[in-house]
Amino acid sequence: MKNSIQILLEAIHPLTEFQRNAKAHLSWVNKTGRPEILTVNGKAEAVLMGKHSYEKMVEAMEELETLKSIRRGLNEMEKGKTIASATVHQRLRKL
């Protein structure tokens, strides 16, 4: 099941409105921790989010990449696609 972010209707704004009231929009995303969708000609074109929310998202993405790498390594171990550490050390000494 895919998680989806619920965007509140009140968090969808035309880009021109954002340009006129940028400070208020920045205050809202930082206060609520929720993103805003900025539209051009009625279509979503950009997402505005606060610094703290962005930092949390980046941390979560980095953690996810780490977990994916660990899972990939474990799968390779289960398939026997690994090299003994002694062999690796020997090869490194020869370099």
Image (tube, rainbow, N blue to C red):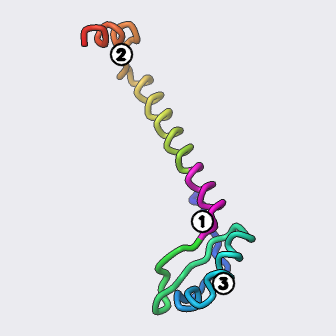
Label 2 and label 3: CA atoms lie apart by: 54 Å
Q: Quadrant of residue 35?
A: bottom right
Residue type highlighted by circle 3: Leu
Q: Position of residue 38 (x, y in %)?
A: 54, 82
Quadrant of the snapshot with the C terminus: top left
Q: Which residue is mark 2?
A: 83
Point 38% across, 11% down: residue: 84
Q: Which residue is mark 3?
A: 9
Q: Nearer the viewer, residue 58 or 42?
A: 58
Residue type highlighted by circle 2: Ile
Q: Nearer the viewer, residue 61 or 54?
A: 54
Label 1 and label 3: CA atoms lie apart by: 15 Å
Of mark 1 and mark 3, the one earlier in the sequence is 1
Q: Mark 2 and 3 residues: CB-CB less than 8 Å, in contact?
A: no
From which residue to which does the magenta span run?
49-60
Q: Which residue is mark 1?
A: 4
Q: Residues within 10 Å of mark 2 (few under 14, many from 20)?
A: few
Point 49% across, 43% down: residue: 65
